[in-house]
Image: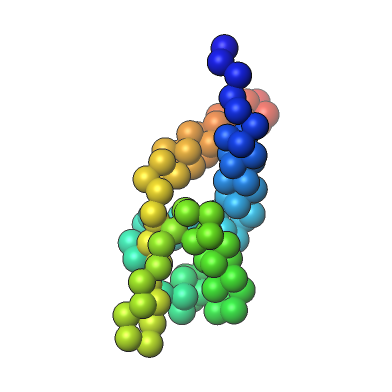
C-alpha cells in the first residue's frame, strides 16, 4: 500500500468535514437533483434560512465542491466537483447496507 502524503490526507479530511454536515450534504443533494439553484431556491427546498444556506454554500465554494455565478441580483450555485456524486453514492449505499444488517 502506498503511503499517502500528509497534505493529501489533510485535504481529504477537510473534504469529508465539509460533507459531514447534514445541512451541507442536503444542499449538495438538492443541487444534484435540481441543477443550478439560487440561495432562495435552496433555502425553500431544504427548509433552511437564506443566511444559513448562504454561509454553508460559501464553505462549500471555498472547498471547491460548488461554484457560483452572479446572474443579475441572484447568484446561482452548482456542483463543481464531479467526484462528489460518486463519493455520496458510495457512502449512502454503505449506510443503507449497514442499516439493513442492523435491522435484522
Residue 36 point in image, percent of width and height: 34, 66
**Residue 51 is at least partly visible in this image:** yes
Q: Residue at x 48, y 42 (%)?
A: 88
* 51 or 6, nearer to the observer: 6
| Image coordinates for residue 65, horizontal then vertical, percent | 47, 53
Q: Quadrant of the C terminus?
A: top right
Q: Which residue is nearer to you in this view: 30 or 66?
A: 66
Classify residue 74 as left or right of residue 21: left
- Residue 8 position in % (x across, y down): 58, 35
Single out the residue that lies furthest toward the bottom: 73
The residue shown at (47%, 54%) is 64
Q: Is residue 26 visible?
A: no
The color scheme shown is: rainbow
Report the side of 31 relative to 19 (left or right): left
What residue is rendered at 38% in x and 87% in y?
A: 73
- Measured along the vertical axis of the image, is residue 97 above or below residue 57? above
- Total numbered circles: 0
Residue 79 found in image quarter:
bottom left
Going 40% across and 68% down the picture, which residue do you hit?
68
Residue 63 on image: x %, y %: 53, 54
Q: Could you tell me which quadrant the N terminus lies in? A: top right
Quadrant of the rendered image containing residue 25: bottom right
- As drawn, the residue found furthest toward the top would be 1
Amino acid at each position: 500500500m502506498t503511503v499517502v502524503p500528509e497534505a493529501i490526507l489533510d485535504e481529504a479530511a477537510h473534504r469529508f468535514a465539509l460533507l459531514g454536515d447534514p445541512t451541507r450534504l442536503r444542499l449538495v443533494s438538492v443541487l444534484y437533483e435540481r441543477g443550478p439553484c439560487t440561495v432562495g431556491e435552496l433555502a425553500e427546498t431544504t427548509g433552511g434560512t437564506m443566511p444559513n444556506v448562504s454561509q454553508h454554500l460559501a464553505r462549500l465554494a471555498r472547498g471547491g465542491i460548488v461554484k457560483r455565478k452572479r446572474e443579475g441580483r441572484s447568484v446561482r450555485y452548482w456542483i463543481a466537483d464531479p467526484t462528489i456524486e460518486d463519493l455520496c453514492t458510495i457512502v449512502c449505499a454503505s449506510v443503507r447496507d449497514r442499516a439493513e444488517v442492523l435491522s435484522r
